Structure formats: structure tokens, C-alpha cells
């Protein structure tokens, strides 16, 4: 890849999405998509995810909500995994998607629950709730 990836954004992207996902995304980059990879690494993963004001758990909650509301199922699956990496429990993911049902509609939540159910089954060992609650 000839486009330079922002080091801070790349580090955050790896922490949130995992090395395997990021390595696969970069390996699948060609002349058509390399600038896009550089763009999202700089502006999404450094410019937004590294901003103060919201922690990663909160950013995951916002991201799950928006992706579910907009029916972006592929990105939603990726971010359900990321939310778990950021410490969200099954209960918290369920609550986010219930909120989506009220504000974005039952069909959006229904689709999102199907995606989350599949991903959480693949992941397996995700806590039901936070022991601190």
C-alpha cells in the first residue's frame, strides 16, 4: 500500500477492530481503495475515535445505534465485535438495539438483533452483564 496510514489512527483501529481485521482490510487494498483506507484511518480512527469527550465504550454505543438505524449490516457486525472488544456486555448491546427499535423503528432493530445474535454466537464468551452493576 503506497498511501501513508496515520500511525495513531492505525493503532486505534487495531485496538478496536483487532489486528486480523485490519491486516485483512489492508491486504485487500489496491489502487482503487488505498486512498480510502488512508482516509478512514486518519479521519475516523484518529480524528474521531481518538477525540476526548467520549470513551471507546460510548463511541461503540453511538456507532452501533447509527449503523443499526441505517441498516448497515456488514459494518454493524464488525462493530458488534468492536463493542465487545471495548467492553460492552450482551445486556448493553441488547439495550442499545432496543433503543434503536423505539427511535429508528422495529424493522431496523429486528435486522440489528439478527446481526448481533449471529456475531455474539460466533464470539461465544461475552459477559451477559457488567459485574459492577
Image: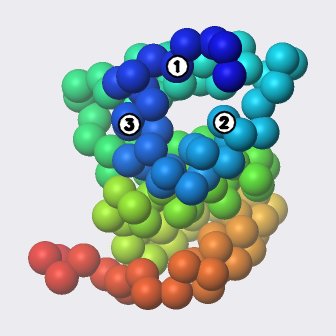
Q: Nearer the viewer, mark 3 or mark 1?
A: 1
The answer to whether residue 69 of the structure is visible from this angle is no
The image shows residue 65, relative to residue 101, as above or below, that is above
Label 2 residue SS: helix
**Closer to the N terminus: mark 2 or mark 1?**
1
Marks 2/1: CA distance? 10 Å
Residue at 54% across / 79% down in the picture? 123
* Left or right of 57 in this view: 102: right
Is the C terminus in the top left, top right, bottom left or bottom right quadrant? bottom left
Residue at 38% across / 85% down in the picture? 128
Label 3 residue SS: helix
Given contact means CB atoms under 8 Å apart, are the residues at marks 2 and 1 in contact?
yes
35 or 91, which lies in front?
A: 35
Question: Which disc number belongs to residue 5?
Answer: 1
Marks 3/1: CA distance? 12 Å
* Left or right of 92 in this view: 63: right
Question: Which disc number belongs to residue 12?
Answer: 3
**Closer to the N terminus: mark 2 or mark 3?**
3
Residue at 52% across / 87% down in the picture? 124
- Badge 2 density bin: few <14, some 14–19, many ≥20, Cα 10 Å: some
Is the N terminus in the top left, top right, bottom left or bottom right quadrant? top right
Q: Position of residue 36 (x, y in %)?
A: 71, 19
Q: Which residue is mark 2?
A: 26
Amino acid at each position: 500500500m503506497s498511501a501513508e496510514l496515520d500511525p495513531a489512527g492505525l493503532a486505534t483501529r487495531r485496538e478496536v477492530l483487532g489486528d486480523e481485521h485490519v491486516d485483512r482490510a489492508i491486504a485487500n487494498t489496491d489502487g482503487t481503495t488505498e486512498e480510502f483506507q488512508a482516509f478512514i484511518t486518519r479521519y475516523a480512527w484518529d480524528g474521531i475515535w481518538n477525540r476526548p469527550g467520549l470513551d471507546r465504550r460510548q463511541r461503540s454505543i453511538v456507532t452501533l445505534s447509527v449503523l443499526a438505524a441505517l441498516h448497515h449490516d456488514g459494518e454493524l457486525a464488525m462493530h458488534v465485535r468492536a463493542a465487545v472488544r471495548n467492553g460492552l456486555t450482551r445486556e448493553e448491546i441488547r439495550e442499545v438495539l432496543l433503543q434503536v427499535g423505539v427511535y429508528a423503528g422495529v424493522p431496523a432493530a429486528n435486522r440489528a438483533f439478527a446481526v448481533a445474535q449471529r456475531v455474539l454466537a460466533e464470539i461465544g464468551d461475552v459477559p451477559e452483564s457488567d459485574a459492577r452493576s
